[in-house]
């Protein structure tokens, strides 16, 4: 038996997002978001599910903070619903929205839990989508003003801010693949959205510095890693393109002020380019205080002929979680090494990692040994990265509790805490007790 030991000051945490847990969709002046519209459109979300009630955390936040406190985590990553603060996206502030998050953040602080606040986890106010959404540069201004309102209102309370969760999902998954709100299938639109989101990120960092906000700011891109099936140069090149399309496109501009040529040349040949204006890339390259990394999966790939990227994934027999994603813990190490090698020693938080399993209810508890195994394997790779000098400061497990899993509705569970979506009863799973121990001692046995 060996011990995998994490640094003493390592921050153990858990994560959720507003639309996935809050519910109370039409209470206290909250405006409509694109996810209300999308989930209300037949055929978009499994089983016709929506976030109207979700985990009802809007009303049960005290119980949820109790769960966090008992779990023993030092930090909680949550997101703010923009349409609670600005029901129309801009203009009139809704004081009740701010009030809710103040009550909630105060509760976290009173229990010694550090709030890590994501400003945008996909619930764009519908009123802004009606004007073109992230395709429209005016949305950038509205977002930065919303961010400023949050910085001013929570000064001294929230000291870790994340501008955007998963720009790849905001742009590609939602505007090219059509799987998330607003559900379009248009590559140029996806490039526009991705670019405007990155500009909004940069403008927000500028505003944060100009206001002299106490605290740190970063962004949380999602990453995957593909390694080549063979030693053939064309397989390596195909994987480089796949990694650039998913990871580099949203990370390289933050540090180098340019899109990765391996992807942009490829897109250009197909007639697509991001709508870069003078000064945009400088704006995007604002120094950030930390980089959030979300990581779940990856795999093996090679040169393919049918795919626009000239890439094809090869199933080499990976085990999969119940959402069908390969379990590939070493990909996390590869992503972290790549970041260190390409972009230097930026402090990193793993802002999401976790596993989807249909839990087995048994006498006396919820047995989720597979989730424990998944997390354990990823923590080992994370530890290897730290031992190799990658500057990882903390780990926010996705997710504190089962919740609305977007297009999958309530059919997919990622939580440490089981939620019965009929009664809203919360039940701690085996993984909850296992993670509690890790958060307490800072090491695990392998
Ligand atoms: O539930 C999502 C989360 O909102 C964003 N990252 C991936 C998770 C699992 O799919």
Image: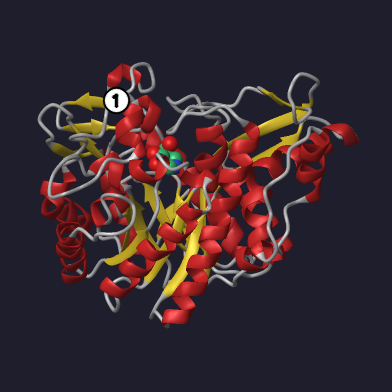
Which of the pair 204/307 is nearer the observer?
A: 204
Residue 373 in sight = no
Q: Position of residue 250 (x, y in %)?
A: 62, 51
Task: Please tell me which residue is depicted at 13% across the width and 44% down the height of the picture.
Answer: 27
Whether 347 is drawn above or below 301: the answer is below
Task: Please tell me which residue is depicted at 36% across the width and 29% down the height of the picture.
Answer: 38
Q: Position of residue 359 (x, y in %)?
A: 29, 27
Q: Which residue is mark 1?
A: 40
Residue 123 is left or right of residue 429, and the answer is right
Q: Quadrant of residue 188?
A: top right
Q: Position of residue 239 (x, y in %)?
A: 76, 37
Task: Please tell me which residue is depicted at 24% across the width and 45% down the height of the picture.
Answer: 31
Whether 23 is drawn above or below 361: the answer is below
Whether 310 is drawn above or below 221: the answer is above
| SS for dot 1 | loop
Quadrant of the image where one finds ligand 1: top left
């Amino acid at each position: 038996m060996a011990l995998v030991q994490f640094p003493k000051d390592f921050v153990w945490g858990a994560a959720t997002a507003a639309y996935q847990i809050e519910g109370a969709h039409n209470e206290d002046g909250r405006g409509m978001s694109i996810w209300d519209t999308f989930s209300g459109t037949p055929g978009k979300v499994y089983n016709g599910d929506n976030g109207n009630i979700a985990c009802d955390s809007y009303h049960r936040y005290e119980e949820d903070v109790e769960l966090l406190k008992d779990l023993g985590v030092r930090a909680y990553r949550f997101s703010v619903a923009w349409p609670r603060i600005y029901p129309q996206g801009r203009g009139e502030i809704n004081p009740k929205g701010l009030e809710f998050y103040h009550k909630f953040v105060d509760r976290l602080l009173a229990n010694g839990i550090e709030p890590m606040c994501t400003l945008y986890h996909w619930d764009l106010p519908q009123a802004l989508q009606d004007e073109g959404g992230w395709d429209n540069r005016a949305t950038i201004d509205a977002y930065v003003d919303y961010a400023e309102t949050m910085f001013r209102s929570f000064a001294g309370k929230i000291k870790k801010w994340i501008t955007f969760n998963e720009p790849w999902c905001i742009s590609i998954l939602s505007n090219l693949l059509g799987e998330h709100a607003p559900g379009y299938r248009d590559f140029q639109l996806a490039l526009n959205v991705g670019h405007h989101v990155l500009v909004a990120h940069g403008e927000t960092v500028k505003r944060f510095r100009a206001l002299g906000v106490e605290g740190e700011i970063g962004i949380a891109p999602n990453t995957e890693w593909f390694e080549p099936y063979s030693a053939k140069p064309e397989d390596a090149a195909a994987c480089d393109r796949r990694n650039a399309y998913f990871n580099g496109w949203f990370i390289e501009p933050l540090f180098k002020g340019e899109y990765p040529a391996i992807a942009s040349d490829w897109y250009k040949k197909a007639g697509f380019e991001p709508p870069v204006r003078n000064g945009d890339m400088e704006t995007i390259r604002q120094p950030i205080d930390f980089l959030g990394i979300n990581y779940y999966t990856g795999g093996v790939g090679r040169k393919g002929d049918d795919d626009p990227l000239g890439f094809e994934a090869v199933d080499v027999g990976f085990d999969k979680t119940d959402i069908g994603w390969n379990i590939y813990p070493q990909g996390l190490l590869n992503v972290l090494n790549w970041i260190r090698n390409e972009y230097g020693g930026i402090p990193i938080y793993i802002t999401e990692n976790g596993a989807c399993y249909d839990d087995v209810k048994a006498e006396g508890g919820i047995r989720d040994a597979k989730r424990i195994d998944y997390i354990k394997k990823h923590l080992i790779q994370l530890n290897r990265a730290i031992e190799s000098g990658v500057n990882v400061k903390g780990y926010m497990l996705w997710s504190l509790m089962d919740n609305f899993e977007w297009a999958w509705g309530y059919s997919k569970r990622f939580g440490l805490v089981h939620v019965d979506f009929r009664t809203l009863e919360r039940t701690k799973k085996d993984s909850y007790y296992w993670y509690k121990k890790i958060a307490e001692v800072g090491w695990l046995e392998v």
